[in-house]
Amino acid sequence: MNVLVVGSGGREHALAWALRRSPRLGRLAVAPGNAGTAAIAENLPVGPTDVAGIVRAALEWGAELVVVGPDAALGAGVVDAVQAAGITAFGPTQAAAQIETSKRFAKEIMQTVGVPTARWRACDTLEAARAALAEFGAPVVVKADGLAAGKGAIVCETLEQAEQALEAMMVQRIFGDAGRQVVIEEKLSGREVSLLALVDGEHLTPLPPACDYKPVGEGNTGPNTGGMGGYTPPEFFSFYEASHTATTIMQPVVDELRRRGLPFRGVLYAGLMLTAAGPKVLEFNARFGDPEAQVILPCLDVDLLDLLHATATGGLAGIKLPPPTRAAVNVVLAAENYPGPPVTGDVIHGLDAVPPDVLVFHAGTQRVGDRILTAGGRVLHVVGVGSSVEQARERAYQGVEAITFRGRHYRRDIARGS
Ligand code: AMP
Ligand code: GLY
């Protein structure tokens, strides 16, 4: 089967790497990809939100399955358009992806089916948002309704901070139209975990749970990023608990979307806070997490192509994955100034020198001649795989030592029990 992966980050490199291992794979392409995917697949020069361009490329290249990675592509309707062209697509339609692309939509679904989540209020004017802040008091969380590259939730310890967040989102529009509406919500506390499951419209197959690290600085300090690292398995949330929680928290959402005529096919991802009152949903995503995919996929002992195809064609009934027997730790190497506008164009050294059992998934990279240059904020995901989290972490940091580029920064505390 010829497969086209849409996207250009570490998640898409990991998907391409895992798909490569399937005996059923024919040709493999990534659009637009990066220097890492170019080494294992054909890169097609089309952006992930260029809907007509993706459809044209899929038809011309002969794709039989299109796997959509990024939220922006789902939000732009890539899956709808690919399906309309008669090609099987992995990922939800634009309407079903609203579970991620609109926080308000997600909250309304959760309320309808009684999924535990923070108390909330959706506001479409500054006045309404200010009134909600006054009612909730501090601490409080202010979220842009739409997509904001993982940076749209601001946890505010004081009402002054919350007022500034509102001003930035609704008046200055730092997230563009995504901030036209906001959701104000109660601040929860507890440990966070990412729960992912494959969903074929009706049935759900849980994947191993994982943890990610959003803040840029060690000890979870500084501004949020797209993710500075991650690991699986979490020591505090087993595969069994994940499977149970998927049944209690995700299945009702899957059922409700189907009831509304918006069957969800793809990866449903719940960002959970494990509070004293049990797990509560912080957000839903409609795709593989990034950087979670880079640790989950290397721990799966299944044919990913079979699994994604079954998901896309309604064939997950009765498919349950065995508990994983490996651990993986992902340390992100970021470019200077990230999560601000990153410095790019620096030469990356040492990619050939990483030890065995270390996978390097590229994110913001570009090949120019025989050199590989930095080309984005998150540059590389260095993933150690082992029989325990400790072993996987050791290997990941050995890989990190081997790779250098000017201005590189990373967190030294990934998978160190926080
Ligand atoms: P989100 O984009 O909704 O996943 O939020 C990004 C991050 O903000 C989460 O991973 C949490 O660390 C934090 N966050 C979001 N909502 C809440 C909440 N209600 N209470 C506390 N922290 C939150
Ligand atoms: N790991 C966070 C995300 O993919 O949204």
Image (tube, rainbow, N blue to C red):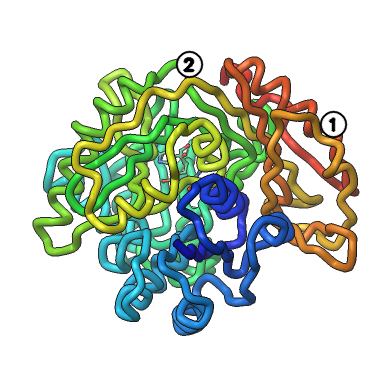
Residue 260 is situated, as x and y percent measured from the top left of the image, at 11, 61
- In the picture provided, is 248 more to the left or to the right than 208? left
The circle drawn on residue 78 is none
The image shows residue 48, relative to residue 399, as above or below, that is below
**Three-letter amino acid code of the residue under disc 1:** Glu
Q: Is mark 1 within 8 Å of ligand 2?
A: no
Question: Disc count in the image?
Answer: 2
Label 1: state its secondary structure: helix
Which residue sits at x=62%, y=21%? 386
Q: Residues within 10 Å of mark 1 (few under 14, many from 20)?
A: few
Is 331 on the left or on the right of 135, as rendered?
A: right
Q: Are the two marked residues, 1 and 2, in contact with CB atoms closer than 8 angstroms?
A: no
Return the x and y of residue 50 as percentages of the image width and height.
51, 79
Can residue 8 be seen here?
yes
Residue located at (76% from left, 27% from top): 397
Residue in the picture at 85% in, 40% down: 403
| Type of the residue with mark 2 | Glu
User: For mark 1, what is the residue?
Assistant: 401
* Distance (Cα) linking label 1 and label 2: 26 Å
Q: Which residue is mark 2?
A: 235
Q: Residues within 10 Å of mark 2 (few under 14, many from 20)?
A: few
